[in-house]
Amino acid sequence: MAPISVLIVEDSPVAKELLVATLNSDPRLEVIYTVETAERALAVIPRLKPDVICMDINLPGMNGIEATRRIMQEWPTPIIIVAADLRNSTVHKTMDALAAGALAAIEKPKVDSAEAYNAMARSMCNQFVNLSQLNVVRQRFNAQRSARTADASPARQGQDCACEVVAIVASTGGPAAVSTILQGLPDSFATPILIVQHMGGEFLEGYANWLNSNVRAGVSLARNLEIARPGQIYVAPGGHHLVYRNERLVLVADPSTTGHVPAGDELFKSIAANVGERAIGVLLTGMGADGAAGLLDMHHAGAYTIAQDRATSVVYGMPGAAEARGAAREILPIGSIASRIVELASRSPNIRRAS
């Protein structure tokens, strides 16, 4: 079987050399070409047809965001963003690239120690292998990238909402999907929203800041024992599971190197145990099955559960696992989820009656 072909788009000679060495160290991967500009990448992609593209953000001329958008419109290919640092501006650009169709973001490799480098290399190569196997689709940006208006959803919600909390879990393709939902909520939406996004922990603060700059509600990283306030949005931080108890956010440290931290199952299960029917759970696009078991617990507890549909999911793994278990009461396209949340949250006396 031929190795997975990789195109590297990187203008730094040092970073390029390290990326080539790291990816070529795995026999499953082969770097077939490197280019220094996005313009050059666009010129060679139709001929090379790489299985996966490693894309820098800050490039001379066209940046990595616009390059990602062009590639996903013309030659849909799995794209992994590599970020040189975690400065706020860089992370924001990285999140914009994910919203434009890139599948994942990673830090550029560093050689701090042999042990750290080897662990990083294994993780990076595994991610390239896994994401190269996805069938990405041509992207459309008009609807998803439009600004949210105050009456974007048909229902309006006030402080007397029957729903105590909304929980959203996402992985691959999640930044764009989550942003679409949050932009679709009206200004009056008063229920706290808790988000678990599978992403490197080092990116999650920047992810929260990026969401905060793209939606009108306040978005922040969750803090331990913080009271969930009406109308606020909280993102689970890296290295901790986010659980919900007695209207408070509880962070549970987990140094595990296996499984997802934070995990959607942990959030959903805590809401099932502590809130029951006065909650809404939403499971979005992503690889694997995290969140499916917890969403089933929420369903059994009487909460209203929604999964993103196959057609609008970048990866139907997580929502598909929920569908297979019968965990989702509804399976909806991403563009319909926000209005459904608002409709359900405003029902009285409880959302269990929703059909």
Image (cartoon, rainbow, N blue to C red):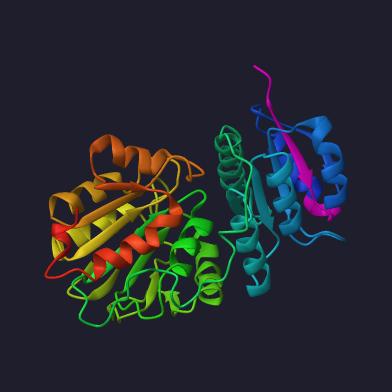
Query: What percent of the width, then of the height, locates residue 235?
Result: 41, 68
Q: Describe residue 93's horizontal placement relative to residue 67 as left or right.
A: left
Of 206 and 181, which appears nearest the observer?
Answer: 181
Tell me which corner region of the image, top left, top right, bottom left or bottom right, holds residue 62: bottom right
What residue sits 46% from the left and 60% below the top?
A: 178
Query: What percent of the width, then of the height, locates residue 177?
Result: 48, 56
Query: What percent of the width, then of the height, locates residue 4?
Result: 67, 29
Of 114 and 215, which appears nearest the observer?
Answer: 215
Q: Describe residue 9's horizontal placement relative to residue 278 as left or right.
A: right
- Magenta-span inclusion, residue 7: yes
Tell me which corner region of the image, top left, top right, bottom left or bottom right, holds residue 202: bottom right
Of 171 and 140, which appears nearest the observer?
Answer: 140
Q: Describe residue 315's horizontal placement relative to residue 23 as left or right.
A: left
Of 95 and 339, which appears nearest the observer?
Answer: 339
Quadrant location of the N terminus in the rendered image: top right
Vertical relation: 97 (above or below) 307: below
Tell me which corner region of the image, top left, top right, bottom left or bottom right, holds residue 147: bottom right
Vertical relation: 22 (above or below) 205: above
What residue sits 22% from the left and 56% below the top?
A: 304
Vertical relation: 191 (above or below) 140: below
- Magenta-span inclusion, residue 13: yes
Query: What percent of the width, then of the height, locates residue 175?
Result: 52, 59
What residue sits 44% from the left and 79% below the top?
A: 217
Q: Is residue 12 visible?
A: yes
**Figure disc tally:** 0
Q: Which residues are magenta?
A: 1-15
Q: Is residue 36 visible?
A: no
**Residue at the farthest front position:** 154
Q: Describe residue 152's horizontal placement relative to residue 293 as left or right.
A: right
Vertical relation: 112 (above or below) 162: above
